[in-house]
Image: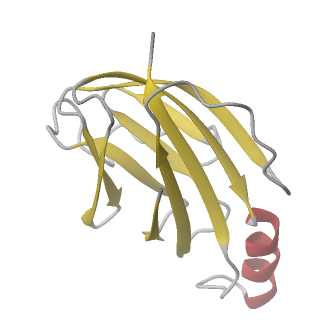
Amino acid sequence: MAEYVVPVSFYTFALQDTAEQGEIFPAGLVPKSRAAFVEIRPGRLDITTAAHTHEVVLTVNVLTGPPAPDAVGNVEESTSGTVTSPSGELAAWEMLGRTPYTISLSHGPGTYGFDAVSMGGAAVRRAETAIGGGPTGAVERIRIRFWPAG
């Protein structure tokens, strides 16, 4: 398990394959008004957050097989799906570019299942509204698990 503090602006960040094939984040970004919690794109997951500008605590678990159901408390958003990684590594991207955070997937290049949950977004939205925008000091947490698909 690894934990990262990822900067967010314009409600989003991404996990992009390090081979950087196809559209590079933020190209093709779905507007917030239509975006799902996680938008699956070729070689990339675009993650929609609760506030315009803040930091998200991202916890990543890379597994060798499908996970057992877990009891994560206070989940506000959840989703699952698959993503293909040509390189076997995903890097966190923010609007200004690639961050130093890289996630090595357990079986290298291939297709991976994932599930994602978000917690704390409601508190972040309330804080952002109360102060009229900008960093809130509230914490949104996102947990993503990856495992080889099939």
**Residue occupying the point 44% across, 17% down:** 149
**Residue occupying the point 72% across, 85% down:** 132
Tell me which corner region of the image, top left, top right, bottom left or bottom right, holds residue 106: top left
Q: What percent of the width, then of the height, locates residue 64?
A: 43, 30
Figure coloring: secondary structure
Mark yes or no: residue 134 visible. Answer: yes
**Residue 16 falls left or right of residue 20:** right
Tell me which corner region of the image, top left, top right, bottom left or bottom right, holds residue 115: top right
Mark yes or no: residue 31 visible. Answer: no
Q: Is residue 2 above or below residue 46?
A: below
Q: What percent of the width, then of the height, locates residue 48?
A: 57, 50
| Quarter of the image with the C terminus in it | top left
Q: What percent of the width, then of the height, locates residue 34?
A: 63, 38
Q: Is residue 133 above or below residue 19?
A: below
**Residue occupying the point 35% across, 62% down:** 95
**Residue occupying the point 69% across, 53% down:** 118
Q: What percent of the width, then of the height, locates residue 33?
A: 65, 45
**Residue 74 falls left or right of residue 22:** right
**Residue 30 falls left or right of residue 51:** left
